[in-house]
Amino acid sequence: MLINCILISYFLPQMERGVAKVIGGDPKGNNFLYTNGKCVIIRNIENPAIADIYTEHAHTATVAKYAPSGFYIASGDASGKIRIWDTTQKEHILKYEYTPISGKVKDIAWTEDSKRMAVVGDGREKFGAVFLWDTGSSVGDLHGHAKSINSVDIKQARPYRLATASDDTCGSFFKGPPFKFEFTLRDHSQFVNCVRFSPDGKVFVTAGADGQMFLYDANDGKLVSSLGGEKAHKGGIYAVSWSPDGSQLISASGDKTVKLWDVGAGTAVTTFNLGADVTDQQLGCLWQNDHLLTISLSGYINYLDKNSPDRPIRTIKGHSKSIQCLTVHKKDGRPYIYSGTSHYWDAETGENDCFSGKGHSNQVSKMATDDANELVTCSMDDTLRYTNLDKTEYSASHVVKMDFQPKSVSTAAGGLSLAVCIGQIVLLKDKKKVFTLDNLDYEAEVGALHPGGTVAAVGGADGGIRLYAIQGNSLKDEGQTLKAAGAITDMAYSNDGAYLAAIDDKKVATAFTVADNYSVKNEYHGHHAKPVTLAWSPDNEHFATGGMDMIVFIWTIDDSDKRIKLPDTHRLHHVSGLAWVDEHTLVTTSHDASIKQWTIKY
């Protein structure tokens, strides 16, 4: 048995409107860093599909920075905790842990010898600290601000200088070590969001919500000039990043642009327009070697080209929030993975994009494809949507409003769809409601249509699976109820219609033989917690289940003891969706917003 895992999509940075996002750069130039939830994500800058994840924070991770040596990463979280961990080993062994401030960590800076670090953010007693990395002993006092400190940086050459930027509309300048407050920088009129020293250690720049950027002498902290005159941007500036030689920098703004500046001339050389939507606001940036990266409010990561400012040369799209479901469908013979709200991936290359147009306004809870080459989705916005997969564009005319919130949708031949809603079952044909079952004497949880379009199976919270015959445009209760061990959480027919498999909250999977009046073929045990998703292999001999225990099992229909276990499929997050690309390739997703592709040789 051989199991191999490929990452199709890692989650994007978790963004918040009006809040800067720090992107950490690798001193060796290979990787970049950002955070989402309790995780730190390390991605290869040349090939972002190569990624790694650090999951050891107990609270929301907020910022991560490489040590200049490249051997360690320091990451901070919402509780004020700093974890310093190894980058050379896959296990990312913890080296040191400190709690220098009592609130959210907003920025981290190292001295060039990787021996001292500054941490700033929210706090009760203080808004920042500077200390030795290996003992935690203080090497200065970062006082001088009346409100939260948003940003910190340290000059990467002796004599060391340190600068901070704060919500109190001021910056502060320090000399050290030990670092001592020298004076306040009062040139901004609104929040100061970012401060960064040039790589050559000659100057540093501050950027603020007032749309202004100021340049200061790095040695004495005196104002040198402002970039762009009175206004560098029409909106607030959230981040700046220097070119490696210190002659240029880029700035990211809420006005949805990124500007490239000639620092000596004090003028913008290039303006990158990233869009017109509010989600196109630019909240973070990184200049690493020849790569210019920015992060939009949408979480999308844009690669910019200095010589082609009209559009990014590459945009990494994906999910920044949990994914509830996915499915696979072949288009022109190529398998594509469809997930969450509007994203799709080429399963062979990993290239991805989004549907255009306005889609669901709330979380998509279930999806399936039909024989008309459409993606059928149900959402907490109380609608079913039918999206043409050739056009990959949402259509306002192919939306069916439901009376109650749909929890499940399935499809079958002949244009049939079955929606299981709260307190209601709805049969649809050719995108129109044709039959409704109300006043149910049980709580319907999930439905499955037989591929031939002859039977609708509906699983209930009482552990019963009711079978309804599809007669014309109606559902007829045949009086047959199959029993499972507990409340049904998911179920599906095999692709050939020979079996129905169901999972329940008692951690049991059950397979029924359709031709033998739905007799029990086998029961399957192994999950430690509730399984919530199930998918059949195209070979009709195996099906996969995943759930709250972070485990995926691949079961063999004829032998309940013959199984493949994928432990820790999505570390620290339960498995929320499964789909098969082919009989040897399984796709999994989770609330960690990532999608993984597993190659399985039986």
Image (cartoon, rainbow, N blue to C red):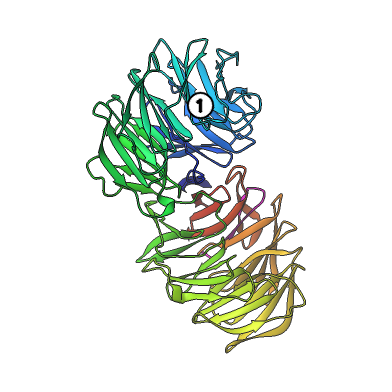
In magenta stretch: residue 57: no
Residue 346 position (above or below residue 379):
above
Whether residue 89 is visible here, answered yes or no, is no
Location of mark 1 (residue): 108
Q: Position of residue 485 (x, y in %)?
A: 76, 63
Which residue appears farthest toward the bottom when viewing the image?
472
Tell me the crowding category of disc 1: few under 14, some 14 to 19, or many 20 or more residues within 10 angstroms, Cα based.
many
Whether residue 436 is visible here, answered yes or no, is yes
**Magenta extent:** 539-553
What amino acid does circle 1 point to? Ile
Q: Position of residue 341 (x, y in %)?
A: 50, 60
> From the viewer's perspective, is 467 left or right of 554?
right
Residue 553 position (above or below residue 407):
above
Quadrant of residue 209 within the rendered picture: top left
Quadrant of residue 195 within the rendered picture: top left
Which residue appears farthest toward the left when viewing the image?
307
- The residue closer to the viewer here, 435 or 530, is 435
- The residue closer to the viewer here, 441 or 481, is 441
Quadrant of residue 534 within the rendered picture: bottom right
> From the viewer's perspective, is 264 left or right of 51?
left
Q: Provide the secondary structure element on which disc 1 rests.
A: strand
In magenta stretch: residue 548: yes
Residue 35 position (above or below residue 514):
above
Q: Position of residue 102 (x, y in %)?
A: 65, 28
Q: Position of residue 180 (x, y in %)?
A: 52, 12
- The residue closer to the viewer here, 493 or 233, is 233
